[in-house]
Structures are given as C-alpha cells and as structure tokens.
Amino acid sequence: MASVAASLSSRSAKQKAEVARNYQKDGKVGEGAYAVVYSGIQLSTKRKVAIKKIKLGQFRDGLDMSAIREVKTLQELRHPNVVELVEVFYQKTNLNLVLEFLESDLEMVIKDKSIVFMPGDVKHWMLMTLRGLDHCHRNWILHRDMKPNNLLIGHDGQLKIADFGLARDFGDRGRQLTSQVVTRWYRAPELLFGAREYGYGVDIWAVGCIFAELLLRNPYLPGNSDMDQINIMFQALGTPTEADWPGLSTLPNFMQYRQYPKTPLRLLFTAAGADTLELLESMLIYDPNKRISAREALLHPYFFNKPRPTKLENLPKPARETEQAVLKRKAAELGELTNAPKKR
Ligand code: ADP
C-alpha cells in the first residue's frame, strides 16, 4: 500500500485536481458491495474507462481495507488476464479506481441463451481464467471471490479477472484467515467447514464450479444456505471421508453428515470428453492439498487435445447491453434475490 499512499499524497493539490479533471464520469454501469462503478473517458487519450468510486471513511467494518487491498493487488498484478488499473485518484472523500473498460462478463455470456457454446469456447475461457489466476498465485495473491461475474470480457474477447476487494496475500503458514469469503455457490469445502488456514485451492475449487457451469449452462452447486451448500455438494460429489481428506474431522465446523455415494461426473456432464472430466474432477477434489494448482491445470492434456481453443475473435459475445438493459437486469436480479431464498 505504501506506493499507492505515497504516490497519492506526494501529488500537490493542483496535480490531484488535474488528474481528476482528466476523467469524465458518465453513466452508472454497476454497483458492488462497497463501490459504484461508472463508465467514463480519460480525456487526454479519449480512452473509455471504468471508474470505481469508493466512498472512504463511511464504513467501520473493514470495507476501506477492501479498497486498499484492491488497489495494492491490482498495482502488483499486471497481466493480460487481470483487469488493468489505469490510475487512482481522490476526489473529496472518494477514492476512484480507474480501470480499463470491459463491456461484458462471463455471467452475461452464460445467461444469454441465444448463444450456443462450442467446446473450444469453454476451453479458451478456462485457459484465460487459469492464466490470470496462475499469475495471481505466482504473486502470492488469493483472489477469494472467483465467480462468473468477476470474469470480465472485453470487446476483443479477452477475459480478465476483476474485483480484487477480497484478495489477500498468502503463503505464511499458520496465518489465520477468515472463512467468510467466496460467494457461496463457488465456496470450497474447507471454507464451508470454517478452515482458517487455506491456500490457492479455494480459488481452484471456484474455477472448477465455473468450469462445470460453462458445461451445464447452469450453476453447478447452487446452495441457498451454507448448510444447503454442503448438502448439495455432498449429493453431487459424495460425502468425503477422513480417508479422502485427512484432517477433515478436525476442521472447526465439521459435523457428521448423511453419507452420499460418489457419482461419476460423466452421468451429469454427458457431452463432455474424458480429458474435460478429468480436469474438472481434479479441481473438485475435497482435500485441498490434492487439488490441482492453476499451473498444473494449464499443463493438463485437455488444453492440448482437440478441439483447439476457439480463436479470441471468434468467441461468442453477449448481445451488447444498453445502459437501460443493464439497469433492468440488475433490478430484476435484485428482485430475484429479495423474493427467493436462493441468494448466492
Ligand atoms: P464490488 O467490488 O463492489 O463487488 P465490482 O468490482 O464487482 O464491485 O463491480 C461492480 C459491477 O461494476 C460489476 O458487476 C460490473 O458490472 C461493473 N464493472 C466493474 N469493473 C468494470 C470494468 N472494468 N469495466 C466495466 N464494468 C465494470
């Protein structure tokens, strides 16, 4: 954080005002847990950008920390599959993160039923996701909120990991972390059992759930409570035993659950090839120590076998949403969340 704070505070008031004046904020494109996101223009270059406006000082529960973490992480991570942080500036009590603008995300693509996915499309989206994630993990950063709507897609088809508000450094063994991370449907079993020490496996599990969702065109494990999440997971993948996962019974929230048998993935993923299922299975291994890493996954035969990943320019894109449609979609989702218990 030192570099962010230093670069911000070393600017004179005049310089700060100049930086802010270089951006024109347009319509609202999204609202997250702690920020409002606008589309905008960098006036000096005419580049379209996204401006994530975070009001500082209004939260007591560490949300300011999320903003700081996000800036720090994005400054450290420069990669074609990680969203680019263009600039940071203060305006009044707001911290503004200027990000490259990406028009859609993987959730929009999955939900757009007018699009038919080819196996090569799924392969390229997985490849880009894993390349971005491998870069995070090589830099000792856990994302901790991998899900389809945090995988943004640009006009050129590039997929980029975004929303690093929950990201953390990892690597110190014994360091206690919170288990209340990762949107429930993508949450790894060790988090559901309250583990305070965990690693890259939590992101890989989430990527496994995203992979399954791309194959099914529906969320794979859509639990409507933490208990339900565990139940759905066990039904899908079998109840784990101490033999599958040594140490399981010592996790803080471990309980004895109903024993479900393990059903082969091919019974649900009927159209997927053997290499696809093998990679998927290695991401959804209960024991985090046995789960595949992003680096290993990138070397899996799935990525080298046919079909080849679809060329970037040929990847399907959702019908361009107008701002109106975005607002309508968000309002509809909000309605869904308040009416139904299925909250992710
Ligand atoms: P939060 O961290 O508060 O959850 P997000 O980073 O997820 O916020 O952003 C909220 C929404 O804003 C996203 O779902 C997306 O619609 C939009 N958004 C975020 N970043 C960008 C970007 N770089 N380009 C375009 N839209 C974005």
Image (tube, helix red, strand yellow):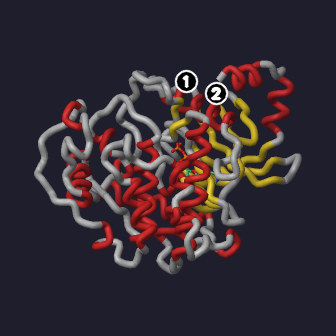
Visible in this render: residue 332? no
Q: Position of residue 157 (x, y in %)?
A: 67, 65
| Amino acid at circle 1 | Gly
Q: Is residue 322 left or right of residue 145?
A: right
Gap in Å between the C-alphas at discs 1 and 2? 8 Å
Q: Choose between 113 and 326: the one closer to the eye.
A: 113
Q: Are marks 1 and 2 in contact (CB under 8 Å)?
A: yes
Task: Say whether residue 252 is left or right of residue 273.
Answer: left
Asked whether, in this view, residue 210 is left or right of residue 303, the answer is: left
Q: Secondary structure at mark 2?
A: loop
Q: Report the amino acid beneath label 2.
A: Thr
Q: Earlier in the sequence, mark 1 or mark 2?
A: 1
Residue named by callout 1: 57
State the residue at coordinates (82%, 38%): 21
Image coords of residue 190 (percent x, y): 31, 40
User: Residue shown at 61%/73% (left/top)?
Assistant: 308
Please tell me how crowded label 2 is: few (under 14), some (14-19), or many (20+) other residues with Cα within 10 Å.
few
- Front residue (pair 87, 299): 299
* Residue at which label 2 appears: 93
> In the rendered image of this protein, does residue 55 appear above or below residue 343?
above
